[in-house]
Image (spheres, rainbow, N blue to C red):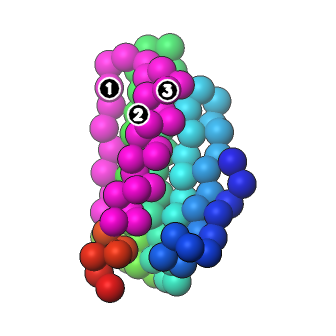
């Protein structure tokens, strides 16, 4: 997916396919939000990070004991992007 910018509260969103999963990086000024969904035949690992400059505000991961489907990965990425957009709007 191509990076998007502009009308999304000034956010730059980049989604990249990673094997069976995806990652997304969202930036606004010095803030950065990142989510990686790594899918293997045995499980799925989800990593979420939020940084303000060099300071990590959030750094967490979770492991699911099954592989997420392509649709579930796409839905999780979309939900994460929408949650960041909502978070940014509320901070205005």
N-terminal of the two: label 1 or label 3?
A: 1
Secondary structure beneath label 3: helix
At label 1, counting other C-alpha atoms closer than 10 Å, the crowd grade (few under 14, some 14-19, many 20 or more) is few
Name the residue beneath numbered marker 1. Answer: 64
Reply yes or no: does residue 62 show up in magenta. yes
What range is drawn magenta here? 58-86
Name the residue beneath numbered marker 2. Answer: 45
Secondary structure beneath label 2: strand
At label 3, counting other C-alpha atoms closer than 10 Å, the crowd grade (few under 14, some 14-19, many 20 or more) is few
N-terminal of the two: label 1 or label 2?
A: 2
The x and y percentages for residue 24 are: 54, 52
> In the image, is 91 to the left or to the right of 85?
left
Of residues 54 and 50, the one drawn nearer to the viewer in this rendering: 50
Position of residue 81 relative to residue 7, above or below, is: above
Position of residue 90 relative to residue 92, above or below, is: above
The x and y percentages for residue 67 are: 43, 19
Residue 71 is marked as 3
Image point (41%, 78%), residue name: 52
Q: Quadrant of the C terminus?
A: bottom left
In the rendered image, the residue lying farthest to the right is: 2
The x and y percentages for residue 7 are: 56, 73
């Amino acid at each position: 997916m191509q990076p998007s910018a502009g009308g999304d509260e000034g956010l730059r969103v980049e989604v990249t396919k990673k094997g069976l999963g995806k990652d997304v990086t969202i930036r606004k000024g010095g803030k950065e939000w990142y989510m990686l969904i790594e899918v293997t035949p045995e499980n799925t690992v989800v990593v979420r990070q939020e940084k303000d400059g060099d300071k990590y505000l959030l750094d967490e991961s979770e492991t699911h004991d099954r592989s997420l489907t392509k649709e579930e990965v796409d839905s999780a990425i979309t939900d994460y992007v929408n949650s960041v957009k909502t978070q940014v709007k509320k901070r205005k």
